[in-house]
Structures are given as structure tokens and as C-alpha cells.
């Protein structure tokens, strides 16, 4: 599937060999020539990509107060989840996740940010802004999720994201320059490089 990644993304070389295939992570190895002319084995993980949505409803933003098995504590998250292997569209994946977790359908979607999870992992987090809700039904949570759907003002959300002790600090660099909800809504569509993975 073709997808958009950051222009400075670190990708697994085409000649790498998959030595382990897991549910979420695959391990790839390849021979890498070093500066002195010798070679050694390099290794990287490929992680299933994740989609997240910043959903705007009546000037508030939806967050999930969620508890999941193996999580150290309850924390706030944006709606979203892992992209299913074989999915044909990240947009369809995030729309499905948002409907299941929040019960909302939105008319307008825009990809605003793509973030690599680590320089040692070829795996990306895709952030969409969803606006103009057109339907709201009861959420349909997975059996492994305890979720409370909440709505925060932009300032409340920004404080949570920028709190170094909080669960949303992974996206602080993206939120730091945004001062208002209008700043978020005016973000342009993300531009990166297209890769076939």
C-alpha cells in the first residue's frame, strides 16, 4: 500500500530480510557497510502503523479516558488505533476507529501530522483532524477497553498534552506552537514523501 511518511523518515532498506513476523512488530536485518569498509548486521523493527483523530465537536475536542490491559495507569488518548494489516485506506481505518470508540461520524477529515515512532522502528502515527459531526450513536468498545469519552476545551487539551507527567506527551512537539483551536483548524494538509510498503 502506498502511504505518506515524513521526508526525513528512516526506512528499512529494500534488501533487508524479515527474520521474525509478529502481531505488531516484524524484525528486519541486513548487512551494512561501515566507514572502514567492513560490514556488520543492522536491525530494525517494522511496526503496524497507528491512526489518531483530533475530533472537534462544538469547539471542544474529544479525548478518551481509557484503561487497557497491561497499561500502567489510566490515561488520556485521542481516538484511534492500529491500522489493520491489509487495510486499503488510513482514512477508512480512522473513521472506523472513531465511530467504534466515540459513536461519532464526521463529514470533514484532514491529515495534519505524521510522526515516526522511533529512529529504530519503521512505524508511523497518523494524526487526522475531524470536523463537522454528522451523526452520533452509542460507541461500540472492544472487550479489552474501558473508555470514557470526554470533551475538553482546546486550552484544557493543550495543558494535558504539554504536561510532562501526563500520558499525551508524545505529541507535545506538534501541539506546542498551536495556541488556539483556530490554529489547529487552519493547519494545512500534511506533505511528506510517498512510499510503497
Image: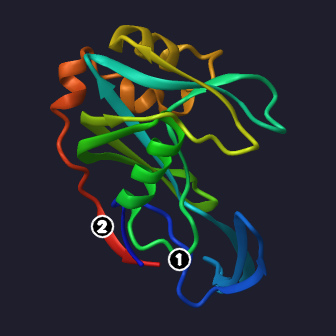
Q: Quadrant of the N terminus?
A: bottom left
Circle nearer the viewer, 1 or 2: 1
How packed mark 1 is, by other alpha carbons closer than 10 Å (few <14, some 14-19, many 20 or more), is few
Front residue of this view, candidates 147 and 155: 147
Where disc 2 sits, the SS reads strand
Q: From this viewpoint, which residue is outermost toward the front?
A: 137
* Left or right, 10 with reference to 134: right
Q: Quadrant of residue 192?
A: bottom left
How packed mark 2 is, by other alpha carbons closer than 10 Å (few <14, some 14-19, many 20 or more), is few
Whether residue 38 is visible: no
Indicate whether 110 appears above or below 174.
below
Whether residue 17 is visible: yes
* Left or right, 162 with reference to 193: right
**Which disc is residue 193 wearing?**
2
Query: Residue at 57% across / 66% down in the picture?
Result: 84
Residue under numbered circle 1: 86
Sequence-first tag of 1 and 2: 1
Amino acid at each position: 500500500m502506498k502511504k505518506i511518511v515524513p521526508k526525513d523518515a528512516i526506512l528499512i532498506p529494500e534488501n533487508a530480510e524479515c527474520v521474525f513476523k509478529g502481531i505488531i512488530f516484524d524484525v528486519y536485518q541486513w548487512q551494512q557497510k561501515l566507514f572502514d569498509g567492513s560490514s556488520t548486521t543492522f536491525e530494525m523493527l517494522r511496526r503496524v502503523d497507528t491512526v489518531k483523530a483530533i475530533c472537534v465537536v462544538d469547539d471542544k475536542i474529544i479525548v478518551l479516558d481509557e484503561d487497557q490491559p497491561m497499561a500502567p495507569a489510566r490515561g488520556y488518548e485521542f481516538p484511534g488505533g492500529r491500522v489493520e494489516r491489509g487495510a486499503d485506506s488510513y482514512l477508512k481505518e480512522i473513521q472506523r476507529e472513531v465511530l467504534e470508540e466515540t459513536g461519532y461520524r464526521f463529514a470533514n477529515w484532514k491529515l495534519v501530522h505524521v510522526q515516526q515512532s522511533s529512529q529504530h522502528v519503521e512505524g508511523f502515527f497518523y494524526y487526522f483532524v475531524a470536523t463537522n459531526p454528522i451523526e452520533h450513536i452509542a460507541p461500540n468498545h472492544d472487550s479489552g477497553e474501558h473508555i470514557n469519552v470526554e470533551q475538553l476545551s482546546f486550552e484544557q487539551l493543550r495543558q494535558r498534552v504539554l504536561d510532562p507527567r501526563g500520558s499525551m506527551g508524545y505529541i507535545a512537539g506538534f501541539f506546542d506552537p498551536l495556541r488556539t483551536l483556530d490554529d489547529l483548524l487552519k493547519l494545512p494538509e500534511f506533505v511528506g514523501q510517498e512510499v510503497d510498503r
